[in-house]
Amino acid sequence: MTIPNHIAIIMDGNGRWAKERRMPRYYGHQEGVKSLKRIVKCCGDIGIKVLTVYAFSTENWKRPVREVKSLMQLMEQTFSDDLDELIANGVRIKILGDVTSVSPRQQRICQTAEERTRHNDRLFLNVAFNYGGRMEIVHAARALASAVRQGQFTVDEITEDVFAQYLFTKGFADPDLIIRTGGELRASNFLLWQGAYAEWYFTDTLWPDFDIEEFEKAIASFRQRERRYGSIKDK
């Protein structure tokens, strides 16, 4: 069976899921973590090598203070409670984003998760945390400009491959498939560079309801796509 090497997911719909049940938004985020755990396990079981999930965007700081605080607490709790299980299942964690903007405690939690899982290679789990695609590109451009100023490159030596080495996803192939749950049809500032030739799969299913069956539907859709990367194949 042909499966994607790298899947990325915009995990959308937690708040609406909770609202439908007349529950606080935090309850939806808690249920969303359960969905993530199901998908992480499934990825390891079927041989997907890289999973990138959009956990907290640079725009999410605009949400009510209470919700932001609860999301940060949920992140801390998830890494604390589930890290041993992730290690046992061969999952390696990498944080994509600007962790310098969060609290020292949260920075330590992210660093610990990366450090304790660094020897695993069954599944690479990239967690986009305080992440934005435009911010990532600006960050890379600044770093590359600094490298040019220091004489490491000339301007003429800058290629797409060189630029990609300054992105947060350095060392990872671009996603083959990007899934967005929750019914919205937009990229929402997620993997803008890396997703240039990804196949997209949109579903109305809210993230807490996104189960293995729904995940398999997304992969089945991917398998039916003809990926031409701008070219035309001879018939």
Image (tube, rainbow, N blue to C red):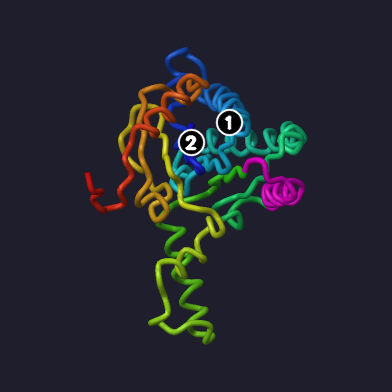
**Residue at image coords 50%, 43%:** 6
Position in image of residue 22 (x %, y %): 47, 13
| Mark 1 crowd level (few <14, some 14–19, many ≥20, 10 Å Cα) | few
| Quarter containing the C terminus | top left
Kind of residue indicated by mark 2: Ile
| Residue situated in front as seen by the camera: 190 or 52 | 52
Residues in magenta?
Answer: 104-123
Q: Is residue 190 left or right of residue 66?
A: left
Give the main secondary structure of the magenta stretch.
helix
- Read off the residue under disc 1: 46
- Read off the residue under disc 2: 3
Q: Quadrant of residue 177?
A: top left
Q: Which secondary structure, mark 2?
A: loop
Position in image of residue 14 (x %, y %): 48, 26
Kind of residue indicated by mark 1: Ile
Q: Which secondary structure, mark 1?
A: helix
Per the rendering, the mark at residue 138 is: none
Q: Find out whether residue 111 is within the magenta segment.
A: yes
